[in-house]
Amino acid sequence: MQVELILRIIGFIVFAIIGWQLGGTISGHPSPLSDPIALRYMIGGAAAGGILGFVITPWLVIRPSAWARRVIHQLPTTQLLAGTVGLIVGLVVAALLAWPLGLLPEPFNRILPFIGAVVFGYMGILVGVTRQHDMRALFSGRRARVKAEEEKSPVLLDTSVIIDGRIADIAATGFIRGLMVVPHFVLNELQYIADSPDTLRRNRGRRGLEILERLRNTAPEKISFSDLDVPEARQVDEKLIQLAQQLNCPIMTNDYNLNRVAVLQGVEVLNVNELANAVKTVVLPGEAISVDIIQEGREVGQGVGYLDDGTMIVVEQGQPFLGRTIQAVVTKVLQTDKGRMLFAQPQEVR
């Protein structure tokens, strides 16, 4: 509030001076201070200008500066640096063209240099931001190094993948090369779920917080909690998608709807469920595998076991071997919407 009051006072003084000068100009008197009527114009102009400056100064200074700080805070450092370099190059080009443009007749000699500065400055920023990776490769002379840095781009974590918990094991294996970023709005959603009156939701939220604590303790260099935000977006999924577009990085999630929407908007998605399905053991009909029969199946005489990756295997005539480990021969592989299921027969029966 003190800063705003000081700015209002400065705006009052500046606009009052402008109003004073404008009042003297409007009066048309060569010596306005010696003319009572002209003096009234000047005093009225100063009063009107001061009031106007006191009112609109925050709109001219504080709010634009707050918006600029918010935008600058959200932009990655590389984009800011690339945009600044592009702006400088564009203004240098405009300055070189200002001298020949200044030789043109009125009014082109005054208008065109200004237009050139605006156009080339904007083009410089645009080229700098869109070609930032090429600029880094040009300045460093190591295009391979730039490519490696791009491959280590950050990964935004969604609430669902944190609650799932497998992200901690995946991170421990080293498959995630980039920095895992958890925005504060995702952390706030986890806290909201953990404070839910519903027991199941509360346990899920607390599990997510425990997973983040585990990641921070075991691999602090791989996880970061960021205060980056997208104020114009309301929903967490919408914030994640827009933030991923700004940072040009993927989202890791288990949420089917978020996955579909993000892909439609051109955002790369890393889905843990798809990864789990991709690394499951490949078993073909006719192969013999070792399986523990741990329960009875739905049909008479069936036994059910599971492979190390969680794949269910139904063993025909396996009920007599309940509680034992046997060798079974795979007879059929069935892919369902819930995952893959194997059917087999005991090798002893065959």
Image (cartoon, rainbow, N blue to C red):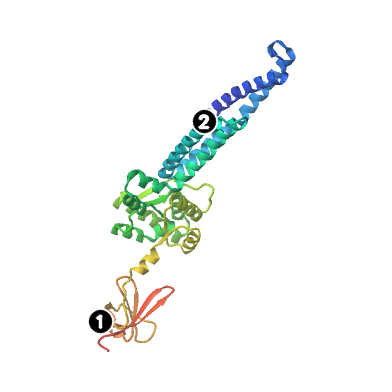
Query: Which residue in the rendered view is the most extreme toward the right?
Result: 37
* Residue 336: x %, y % from top left: 42, 76
Q: Nearer the viewer, mark 2 or mark 1?
A: 2
User: Does residue 346 sit above or below 136 in this rendering?
Assistant: below
Classify residue 341 by image quadrant.
Answer: bottom left
Q: Amino acid at mark 1?
A: Gln
User: Does residue 242 sit above or below 7 in this rendering?
Assistant: below
Q: Amino acid at mark 2?
A: Trp
| Along the line of sight, the residue nearer the viewer: 62 or 17 | 17
The reply, left or right, for residue 198 in relation to residue 178 is right
User: Does residue 279 sit above or below 349 in this rendering?
Assistant: above
Marking on residue 327: 1
Local crowd size for mark 2, using a 10 Å CA cut-off: few (<14), some (14–19), many (≥20): few
Rendered residue at 43%/48% (across/down): 131
| Along the line of sight, the residue nearer the viewer: 312 or 26 | 26
Local SS, label 2: helix
The reply, left or right, for residue 63 in relation to residue 336 is right
* Residue 259: x %, y % from top left: 46, 62
Query: Which residue in the rendered view is the most extreme toward the top?
Result: 34
Q: Which residue is mark 2?
A: 99
* Residue 160: x %, y % from top left: 43, 59
| Along the line of sight, the residue nearer the viewer: 223 or 251 | 251
Local SS, label 1: strand
Mark 2 or mark 1: name the one nearer the start of the chain.
2
Local crowd size for mark 1, using a 10 Å CA cut-off: few (<14), some (14–19), many (≥20): some
Classify residue 190 by image quadrant.
Answer: bottom left
| Along the line of sight, the residue nearer the viewer: 13 or 346 | 13
* Residue 211: x %, y % from top left: 36, 56
The reply, left or right, for residue 140 in relation to residue 264 is left
